Amino acid sequence: MRLLLICYLFFGALLVGCSSQANQSESEIQSETPSSVEETNTNPMSVSENNIKSIFDVTLPMLDGKEKSLKDYEGKVLVLMNVASKCGYTGQYKDWQAYYSAHAKDGIEILGFPANNFGGQEPGSNEEIATFCEANYGVSFPMFSKISVKGDDQHPLYQYLTSATGEKVGWNFNKFVVGKDGKVIKHFGSGVKSDDKDFLKTVADALAK
């Protein structure tokens, strides 16, 4: 009789333990399910940040920090250059400033974009860049705040320029000629100066449109 009582108590305790464990497992599953669903529902969609249809969609700061919309240059032929202060091509500032002084009246604008992507050749602050350009070359064409023109942090403007031409920015002082409508016309490399025949023809054709 005593043995039967012990067996009854043992199996009773075992049944209670199994029931408790089953309830606990179900509770854990229920508590995990909403979390999994919430994580799936809040997963951000991949959205492109570069919705530029022309450069006139871009606004960015100039060297003095003031915001400038490139739409302000609508109706002009533009030459966009990524520039640097410690490059073998830095001397081109003199050439392009002379070109700008002679042809700005014809509806041409040169826009400079300092970038430190190549050889760390533009390490200075915006203030230092402005002082350097004015003191050494008397630069008067518009100069914008330092940006990145290649790599993972490439500015959307240069994403658009390189995508439109299929040409990567290979070094400092690459040029992109942009038409009056804000669409990219052609890319020129670092060695091209303002007296290059192909460059002059490209600009002349753009002005005639």
Image: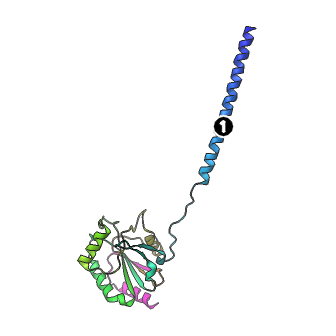
Left or right of 89, for residue 45 = right
Residue 60 image offset from top left, x and y in percent: 42, 72
Residue 5 image offset from top left, x and y in percent: 73, 12
- Residue located 59% across and 50% down the image: 39
Residue positioned most to the top:
1
The count of marks equals 1
Residue 169 image offset from top left, x and y in percent: 39, 71
Tell me the residue that label 1 is attached to.
Answer: 27
Q: Quadrant of residue 6?
A: top right
Q: Quadrant of residue 104?
A: bottom left
Residue positioned most to the left:
136
- Mark 1, secondary structure of its residue: helix
Q: Nearer the viewer, residue 61 or 188?
A: 61
Residue 19 image offset from top left, x and y in percent: 70, 29
The span shown in magenta is 185-209
| Mark 1 burial class by Cα count in 10 Å: few <14, some 14-19, many 20+ | few
- Residue located 69% across and 17% down the image: 10
Left or right of 155, for residue 172 = left
Q: Quadrant of residue 91?
A: bottom left
The colour scheme used to paint the residues is rainbow
Q: Is residue 160 magenta?
A: no
- Residue located 43% across and 68% down the image: 155
* Image quadrant containing the N terminus: top right
Inspect the image, locate mark 1, and give the three-letter code of the amino acid beneath it.
Ser
